[in-house]
Amino acid sequence: MERRRLVIIGAGPTGLGAAWRLRELGERDFVVLDAAPEPGGLARSFRDERGFTWDLGGHVLFSHYPYFDAALRAAVGDDGWYHHQREAWARMYGAWVPYPVQNNLRHLPREVLLKCVLGLVRASRGGAGRPENFAQWIDATFGAGLAEVFMRPYNFKVWAYPPESMGWSWIGERVAVTELERVLTNVLLEKDDVSWGPNNTFQFPKEGGTGGVWRAVAKRVGPEHLRLGARVSAVDTQRRVVTLSDGEELRYDALISTMPIDRLLSVMEPRDELARTAASRLVHSSTHVVGLGLQGNAPPSLATKCWMYFPEGNTPFYRATVFSNYSPAHVPDPKRYWSLMTETSESPQKPVLAARLVEDTIQGAIASGLIESRAQVASVWAHRMEYGYPTPSLERDAHLARVMPALEEKNVFSRGRFGAWKYEVSNQDHSFMQGVEVVNRLLLQERETTLVSGR
Ligand SMILES: Cc1cc2nc3c(=O)[nH]c(=O)nc-3n(C[C@H](O)[C@H](O)[C@H](O)COP(=O)(O)OP(=O)(O)OC[C@H]3O[C@@H](n4cnc5c(N)ncnc54)[C@H](O)[C@@H]3O)c2cc1C
């Protein structure tokens, strides 16, 4: 039986981050296993039969870590990137409102604007007490008007769960909050205010979509450390053995897993009923990506837009990205084609009729003014991810507090978007660094910070 000091399940950003650091430290006794035929996990890209490239939803690289930046530069090269100015918009009341909506209310109809401003004024008086859930946080932060016209409907479309069932400790820099004076100034001086946020500029790989980055990282890790098409079907923590679906066994000293934590617990022996039950109560939503390859050129209204939010009911999708604006290589011929990539969430509380989704997406694109007619559609690409968003449910942290220590006792380190189930640290940079930091902990006894403190 093959034996490795470290076995890593998953060649997504987390597993590759761990592998990258292991190589850097001169450690050679490890292997990364992934069920998929390509590295990248949720950050993979696909090319459809007509030659359009698609990501698994709008992936924007913006980083909190110099280490991550340096690794990606080393893998892709300095010249392998486009640098984009973020242009994000919301489609509301038939108008394009620059993001963040609360700073650009002047684009809304007057009576809606008034409702939003009055709500903000009332909310600014305070007195609501500490919010108990995300819904209360929305109301207290944005006031009733903005909550009604944007925050509540949009967040339900994204998360697929009611905000009453979600916590709000994950928010941090993720949601633009509001300064009343700034809002009023922008309204009265008719000013657009679009500079908010950590990702107001971002870089995108010139070739291969987001997945091109992770293919390049995997190449640097080295094929001798990667086994693709290798699905883990069982983990025996007593014998420290991982079994693959073809029956092959691999022995490990320590296991780093990035597969969804509920699935990991369900294939782990001996069974740990407490941890298994806690993991099964973690909540997630699924994501459908529908890509539309389109004939002609993007209309002037979309020519420089990056992504757009759709809070209203006339589209199934909550977000659409003009993916051809990120790189001309995303379409077979940039003179003749452009492309839109949409994301629709699904959960037991927000079911999606998959058989209708492509048609609903095309109709939604027409209804919201993205395209004029279905005759423009040259190619359709549809993909469903069972695990899309790790939901910050109210009970999430209590469940994680049972699961994570129980795994570590067994020398299993579960990290990454669904390995650690912390939305607030589950972007590509965070995930990669979770992998790096767990290796630093195992080999150098350093403290992990991303998972613990979000930084
Ligand atoms: C819709 C959407 C939009 C996003 N937008 C952004 C964004 O704008 N910016 C950003 O930085 N990030 C974004 N992300 C997050 C990004 O995709 C994640 O940060 C990243 O992919 C998480 O990496 P990971 O390695 O933790 O997990 P994953 O990417 O999920 O990788 C886990 C790997 O484990 C493998 N695996 C699972 N089970 C097994 C098994 N039994 N045996 C072997 N292998 C297994 C899978 O095949 C997969 O390759 C987005 C994600 C989604 C879904």
Image (cartoon, grey):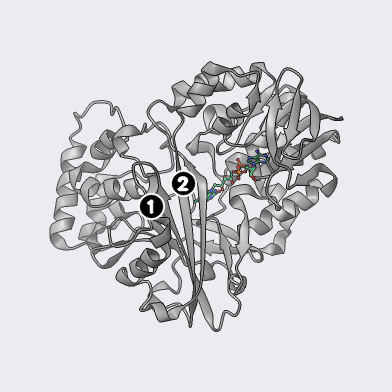
Residue that badge 1 annotates: 352
Comparing 147 with 346, the one in front is 346
Residue sitting at x 15%, y 61%: 110
Is residue 307 at least partly visible in the picture? no
Residue sitting at x 55%, y 44%: 427
In the picture, the quarter occupied by the C terminus is top right
Label 1 within 8 A of ligand 1 by Cβ: no
Judge the density around disc 1: few (<14), some (14-19), many (≥20) Cα neighbours within 10 Å. some
Residue that badge 2 annotates: 286
Comparing 321 with 25, the one in front is 321
Q: CA distance from mark 1 to mark 2?
A: 10 Å
Left or right: 51 in relation to 136: right
Label placed on residue 338: none
Q: Nearer the viewer, mark 1 or mark 2?
A: 1
- Amino acid residing under circle 1: Val
Q: Quadrant of residue 367?
A: bottom left
| Image coords of residue 413 (percent x, y) | 66, 27
Q: Is there a contact, CB below 8 Å, between mark 1 and mark 2?
A: yes
| Image coords of residue 442 (percent x, y) | 73, 24
Identify whether 377 is placed above or below 26. Answer: below
